[in-house]
Amino acid sequence: MRIVHDGDHGIDDAVATLFLLLRGDVELVAIGTVHGNAHAAQAGSNALQLIEVAGRSGIPVAVGAARPLVQPADVTGLVHGLDGLGGQAVPHTAGLAEVSAAEQLVRLARAEPGELTVVATGPLTNIALALLLEPRLPELLRRLVLMGGAVEHPGNITAVAEANVAMDPEAAALVLAAGFPLTLVPLDTTMATWWTADDVARIAAHGTPLTDLLTGVLAHYLDFYALQGGAGGCPLHDPTAAVVAVDPSVVTRTATVPVGVELAPGRTRGMLLVDRRPFAVPDPAAAATEVVLAADRDRITGQLLDVLLR
Ligand code: BDR
Ligand code: CA
């Protein structure tokens, strides 16, 4: 399976990238980075650091959009630290691609029509820009798997909005309306998929350079989620999307429904508009989307640990 990972390489994006780098039946073809958990350039450096610690080389990393399409950039470093990796980032620049992440994606998709799966785990600015550069992008990809949004679960950046959608709602709206073969993995699934304190202890005890980095990076994340009742564990937002992309059999409940994005200013901006009415109401702003509402927590966390501790 050939995958392009587009992310805002914070902590859980890093776990997703490591999984995609190390899983034997996946070829991670390229990485694109975007503003979000960290600045896009910092996220690019982080991606290179992850490739190095995984013992891999020659995987192009392209830095993408530094800000959302319409609203100002908002990189706070609150959840992931200002370096995106909880203070563990080491600057890396050698090997950054000379094209932007959107250009890289368009080139790759044109070169291999129908072959690539894109796993997007940050704001959707790069995917939207790629779509503007190449309107046939939805037909050129095998599948687009997005971590983002909240359906029945509360939001995490506002009462109703999830971070990846809310950090560029216009980009998310463009992508969701475009007719991609699309799987959306929202908070409903990712907030139910945690590494427990025991899982984290297993990683810490493993003692390889990769797990040492992971342990340092996770420490920051655990502190954040401890404040939310995490008890020594953390949710696996982006890694869950990566596992779903590679092994859809972990999914236990889906709905295929039109999904759009609230763009109006105010307290509901960035909220998903999920039309669950039993009759189809055509809406050009909301294409049919496979929404993952639940998945097998044990299989996902187990697959991640198997790959990362191998
Ligand atoms: C998403 O927001 C980011 O903080 C995480 O990396 C994840 O992609 C969860 O809402
Ligand atoms: Ca992310």
Image (cartoon, rainbow, N blue to C red):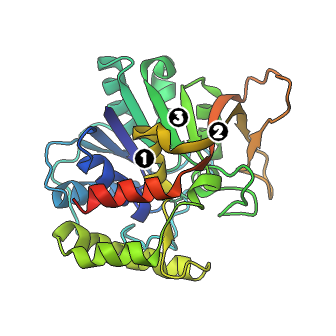
- Structural distance between the alpha carbons of marks 3 and 1: 23 Å
Q: Which label lies toward us, 3 or 1?
A: 1
Q: State the SS at label 2.
A: strand
Q: Name the residue under label 1.
A: 243
Identified by mark 2, the residue type is Thr
Q: Picture coordinates of residue 23 (x, y %)? A: 27, 46
Q: Name the residue under label 3.
A: 128
Question: Which residue is located at x 60 percent, y 23 percent?
Answer: 179
Q: Picture coordinates of residue 157 (x, y %)? A: 65, 63
Can see residue 294? yes
Identified by mark 3, the residue type is Ala
Identified by mark 1, the residue type is Val
- Structural distance between the alpha carbons of marks 3 and 2: 25 Å
Q: Picture coordinates of residue 43 (x, y %)? A: 35, 57
Q: Mark 2 points at which residue?
A: 254
Question: Which residue is located at x 20 percent, y 56 percent?
Answer: 93
Task: Identify which residue, 101 or 21, lies in the foreground.
Answer: 21
Q: State the SS at label 1.
A: helix
Question: Which residue is located at x 48 percent, y 58 percent?
Answer: 298
Please identify the quarter of the rendering in which residue 113 is found: top left
Question: Is residue 37 rendered to the left or right of residue 54?
Answer: right
Task: Identify which residue, 206 or 165, lies in the foreground.
Answer: 206
- 74 above or below 129? below
Task: Identify which residue, 72 or 185, lies in the foreground.
Answer: 185
- 308 above or below 121? below
Q: Which label lies toward us, 3 or 2?
A: 2
Instruction: Assess disc 3: are there few (<14), some (14-19) or many (≥20) residues with their C-alpha within 10 Å of its C-alpha.
Output: many
Question: Is residue 62 rendered to the left or right of residue 186?
Answer: left
Question: Which residue is located at x 55 percent, y 48 percent?
Answer: 68
Q: State the SS at label 3.
A: helix
Quadrant of image for the C terminus:
bottom left
Question: Is residue 147 rendered to the left or right of residue 117?
Answer: right
